């Protein structure tokens, strides 16, 4: 009888040990999954950040080129719209000349 009670106690103790062991295993498994999720999330965020840095660098290069091109265009615009150049073109292509002071007719606004 005593032996049977001890066997039953040992079996119930083993069952409790198995249950607590399974609970500990599940807890550690959950902790492991959380850690892995955090690791993958951090890695993905780092990759996205690096990609954004590359795109920003490329956009800055393009912006610098476009600013230089704009400066060239503004300089060319200033050269093309200079009064001296316009007077030369008007004289050569269309035969126009600047009117003298005696050829100017003033019209009264009334």
Image: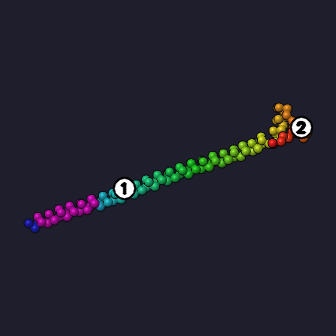
Q: Is residue 1 left or right of residue 90?
A: left
Considering the image in quadrants, where does the N terminus appear?
bottom left
Going 87% across and 39% down the picture, which residue do you hit?
Answer: 104
SS type, badge 1:
helix
Nearest to the observer: residue 89 or residue 106: 106
Q: Position of residue 80 (x, y in %)?
A: 77, 40
Rendered view: 36 above or below 74:
below
> For residue 33, which quarter of the picture?
bottom left
Q: Which residue is mark 2?
A: 103
Of discs 1 and 2, which sits in the foreground?
A: 2
Nearest to the observer: residue 15 or residue 89: 89
Rendered view: 52 above or below 6:
above
Main secondary structure of the magenta stretch: helix
Considering the image in quadrants, where does the C terminus appear?
top right
Q: CA distance from mark 1 to mark 2?
A: 95 Å
* Residue ranking furthest to the top: 94
Q: Position of residue 103 (x, y in %)?
A: 89, 37
Is 12 one of the magenta-colored residues? Answer: yes
Judge the density around disc 1: few (<14), some (14-19), many (≥20) Cα neighbours within 10 Å: few
Q: Which residue is mark 1?
A: 33
Is 52 one of the magenta-colored residues? Answer: no
Judge the density around disc 2: few (<14), some (14-19), many (≥20) Cα neighbours within 10 Å: few
Label disc, if present, on residue 6 of the rendered structure: none
* Residue ranking furthest to the bottom: 2
Q: Position of residue 108 (x, y in %)?
A: 83, 42
The numbered mark, 1 or 2, whose residue comes first in the sequence reads 1
Rendered view: 67 above or below 86:
below
* Residue ranking furthest to the left: 1
Going 85% across and 32% down the picture, which residue do you hit?
Answer: 95
SS type, badge 2:
helix
Going 38% across and 57% down the picture, which residue do you hit?
Answer: 34
Magenta segment, which residues? 4-23
């Amino acid at each position: 009888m005593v032996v049977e009670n001890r066997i039953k106690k040992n079996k119930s103790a083993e069952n409790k040990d198995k249950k607590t062991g399974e609970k500990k295993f599940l807890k550690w498994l959950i902790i492991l999954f959380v850690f892995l999720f955090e690791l993958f999330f951090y890695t993905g965020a780092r990759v996205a950040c690096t990609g954004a840095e590359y795109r920003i660098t490329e956009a800055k290069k393009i912006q610098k080129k476009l600013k230089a091109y704009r400066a060239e265009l503004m300089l060319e615009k200033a050269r093309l719209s200079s009064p001296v150049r316009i007077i030369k073109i008007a004289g050569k292509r269309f035969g126009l000349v600047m009117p003298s002071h005696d050829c100017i007719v003033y019209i009264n606004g009334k």
